[in-house]
Amino acid sequence: MLHDAVRLLIVGVNPGLWTAAVNAPFARPGNRFWPSLHRAGLTDRQLDVTHGLSDADAAHLRERGIGITNLVARASVRADELGAEELRLGHHRLEGLVQGLHAGTGRLPVVAVAGITAFRTAWGDRHAQLGRQEGRVAGAPLWVVPQPSGLNAHENIDTLADKWRQVAAEVDWPAGLSRRRPSGR
């Protein structure tokens, strides 16, 4: 789900089986990704992609400058089923993807990888921590945020939203694009 106006490139580990079946990122019911993005103000409304990504929702993400991809394209029940080599190859593929986005627009997106364990393997840095990384991806600023799956008991929608707000603060949003906190929070 990439386009030429990507300002924030969100990188999942790999699609789960539900996500692959409906062809929409982070689609499994109960996944906290979309609620946390909305609560962080990155989307103007709560997106429900459990049955697929609607044209209107895809257009909304494009307008917001949000692109989504994965380190590994192969679907699995759990991300820990992936091999280290698959994750390392995904890191190298991501480098090329970011270079292509930069060549197409002349600007680098902020890159946010959702999943510290996969990041540590893919980047070969077993001591990496969540947050802004010293390294970059093809020159682009690099963040690691927690995996939003319900399997990650250390996080909830509010803590995930706080981390997305930190990432969003570094993004060069277009003039007039508000990242306001949704009402009610």
Image (cartoon, rainbow, N blue to C red):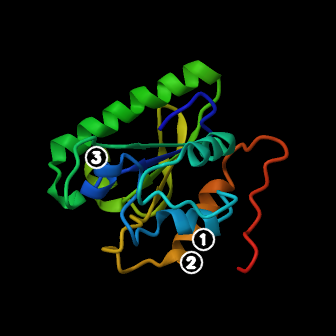
Q: Is residue 154 left or right of residue 140?
A: left
Q: Nearer the viewer, residue 149 or 137?
A: 149
Report helix, strand or loop for mark 1.
helix
Q: Tell me how far mark 3 sits from mark 1, CA to CA.
A: 25 Å
Q: Are marks 3 and 1 in contact (CB under 8 Å)?
A: no
Q: Can you give x and y, in whole percent of width and height, for residue 93 in the image?
A: 33, 31
- Residue 40 higher or lower than 83, as above or below: below
Q: Which residue is mark 1?
A: 162
Q: Residue at x 47, y 57 (%)?
A: 49
Q: Which residue is mark 3?
A: 122
Q: Which residue is mark 2?
A: 158
Three-letter residue code for mark 1: Asp
Residue 16 seen by the camera: yes
- Label 3 or label 1, whichever lies nearer to me, is 1
Q: Is residue 115 left or right of residue 67?
A: left
- Label 2 or label 3, whichever lies nearer to me, is 2
Three-letter residue code for mark 2: Asp
Q: Are marks 2 and 1 in contact (CB under 8 Å)?
A: yes
